[in-house]
Amino acid sequence: MKKTALLLLFATVTTAVVAQSPADRVNPFVGTTNFGTTNPGAVCPNGMMSVVPLNVMGSDKNVFDKDARWWSAPYERTNSFFTGFAHGALSGVGCPDMGSLLTIATSGELEVDYHEYGTDYSDETASPGYYSLMLDRYGIRAEATATLRSSAEKYTFPAGKGNILINLGEGLTNESGAMVRRVSDTEIEGTKLLGTFCYNPQAVFPVYFVMRVSKRPSSAGYWKKQRLMEGPEAEWTPDNGQYKLYTSYGRELAGDDVGYWFSYDNLEEGEQIEVRMGISYVSAENARLNLETEQGDASFDDLRSAARSQWNETLGRIRIFGGSDRQQEVFYTALYHTLIHPSLLNDVNGEYPLMERSGETGVADGERYTVFSLWDTYRNLHQLMTLVYPEKQTDMLRSMVAMYREWGWLPKWELYGRETFTMEGDPSIPVIADSWLKGLRDFDMDAAYEAMKKSATTEGAQNKMRPDTDPYCERGYIPLGYYAADMSGDNSVSHALEYYVADHALSLLAEERGDREFAELLRKRAAGYKHYYSSESGTLRPRTMDGRFLTPFDARQGENFEPVPGFHEGSAWNYTFYVPHDIDGLAKLMGGGRKFVTKLQKVFDEGLYDPANEPDIAYPYLFSRFAGEEWRTQKEVARLLKEYFTTEADGIPGNDDTGTMSAWAVFSMLGFYPDCPGEPYYTLTTPTFDRAEIDTAGGTLVIEAVRPAGGEQFIKSMKLGGKPLKKYRISHDELLKGGRLTFELKN
């Protein structure tokens, strides 16, 4: 073959390979509407740093200044008023926090009130590790990329005067206090107070930063918004409630609603100025170390390329073949979302803030993680980490055990070294049990077991994980009014169901460790859900202090997130089948398998299923517990994937819950799902793709589907490791040892 032809062939093949890289099939804008609360900003896998456009603070001065704090995400796709890049923002959460350290570039005269300097934008693009947009008002192109603990922004200016601002007062956090210090003409450092996640006043913590600009400014200085003065003389105060600038204030400024600006005179058309920032939750010195270590002399493009390479390597542990372009985009976008949180907490030197011990630091054993939204992620995301990213999951387990050592309890919903006590249950237990039973052993299980046993046995108000543990242990259920006198805010049934799942998972560990008496106690506790079953309503139903079922009772109340006695964020129908550890027992209560299946099908047929919240997301897989009904799982999973997971901005069925909804899609599209947290088992369903290759600790797992053309596709037969497979629920060990799972499908 001629050299020219060889070069053309090489170019063609190279282009095809690049076009098919996993990062190319990620759409970061998916989930940015419909309350998905994902963000499209620049972030590396499980990175501490994320650079996210903030567009939820309005331009109307009559709106309360902290209006953004009513939003739980910094970005919403249908909004169009940009007020800066937030650094270290959260993704897929239901409460406001973080979303601070806001940077923006402007042109023309300096303005430091975000109502005035905010701007409409256009030409927005995003891909893993990169984000850009055009600031319409200023004619400035703004670009952002990230390393694990630092960021880089590049601003391309028009000719004339330009400014770069960092606003330390605004953002999603409910705190506005900050300090900023001038280090040199081109560098500042400081700290910003964050916290009160889900309005918990205890969960407050600082983030430290170092920020550098690539060009020496013509002028620079601080600003502070003056406190609104009241009284008869207030109207005569020129700065009352306004922003005041300080060009020669001194080395630092602290207080509420402060910021810093750099101004540039006589910029040339197309001139570029870069902003580099490092953050730390320990100190400004560590923020500087993070910045210098991870960026060095790298250019913006070098950093962008490195971020993309990290994503391709991480996403590439699962390789898919076949399916439509849309399905591949849905899959890799979902996998991308599962790899944002939990996030790194330790700095490059290993230091991190100790759990619930303000001002004290430790040195991580491996990587220290944070943002443990465990009520969500214990159901499937950590199972995905265990399967595909065991080294990450091992460090997450070590992090959880270290939290116990540092403050005496495992995490429930931990955020940057603070426990927010958001949601309910004892969710660390099934995470640890599931990982251990699947073979992850490189962490201190003795300490973990001690911690789990503590939360399962500590009585009374001293039990931080189970505040209503006394009636749970004494009666086998929690009556209405014990946890909250306000019945509409009482989540007693939801609490108990979570404890049943945790105690079942812990019983498996106790049995393995030879703690058989305790294991038997836990098994009896886990059967306590039977106290809640009402044959009259056909559902689980709250019980009052005197042991009677709540009357009157509407099993559909709560389906639109309105308050409902006994249940949290859902109706009785959303919770009734959440007994994954004893489906046979629940079916017996309902009158047998046939009646169970009929009632479960009713949930889907009558719109009682909520795809946007956790308690019922495993419902479709429960059909497969009954021989001959597996087709219902295959049908419902395929329908839900098609209906609720798309490539549009609303392509997630509501709040992604730090990747939990996305993990449901990843597993479901691969053809298996961990339907009982804490049990090392998967239930099988029709895979979306013709072939998937999954890198695991035990080698590459291959999933194949031989499918006919057209029509709905159901499972005709299965083989595992070349041998016929009859059952639809298999263990983790069986799956990995089999190595190759083959489905023959039929219409």
Image: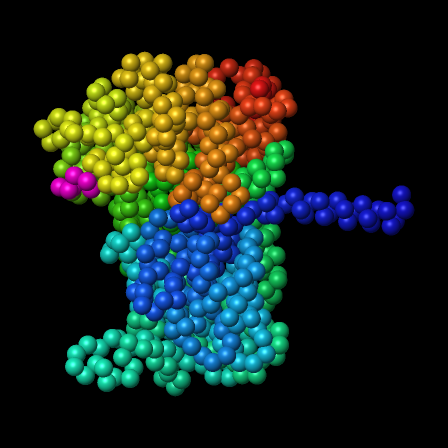
Q: Nearer the viewer, residue 446 or 702?
A: 702
Q: Nearer the viewer, residue 455 or 670?
A: 670
- Magenta stretch contains residue 688: no
Q: Is residue 235 above or below residue 560?
A: below
Q: In this rendering, would 242 be left or right of 114?
A: left
Quarter occupied by the C terminus: top right
Residue under the image location 46 percent in, 19 percent down: 630
Count how many numbered circles sit on residues in the image. Answer: 0
Q: Give percent across and percent down for residue 620.
A: 42, 27
Q: Nearer the viewer, residue 593 or 349?
A: 593
Residue under the image location 31 percent in, 68 percent down: 62
Q: Give percent across and percent down for residue 687.
A: 55, 28
Does residue 155 show up?
A: no
Q: Nearer the viewer, residue 348 or 170?
A: 170
Q: Give percent across and percent down for residue 661.
A: 43, 39
- Magenta stretch contains residue 486: yes
Q: Is residue 182 above or below residue 308?
A: below
Residue under the image location 12 percent in, 26 percent down: 547
Residue 746 lies in what quarter of the image?
top right
Give the extent of the magenta segment.
484-489
Residue 232 lies in what quarter of the image?
bottom left
Quarter occupied by the N terminus: top right
**Residue positioned most to the right:** 2
Does residue 744 show up?
A: yes
Residue under the image location 58 percent in, 39 percent down: 326
Q: Give percent across and percent down for residue 218.
A: 51, 84
Instruction: Tell me how the rendering is colored.
Output: rainbow
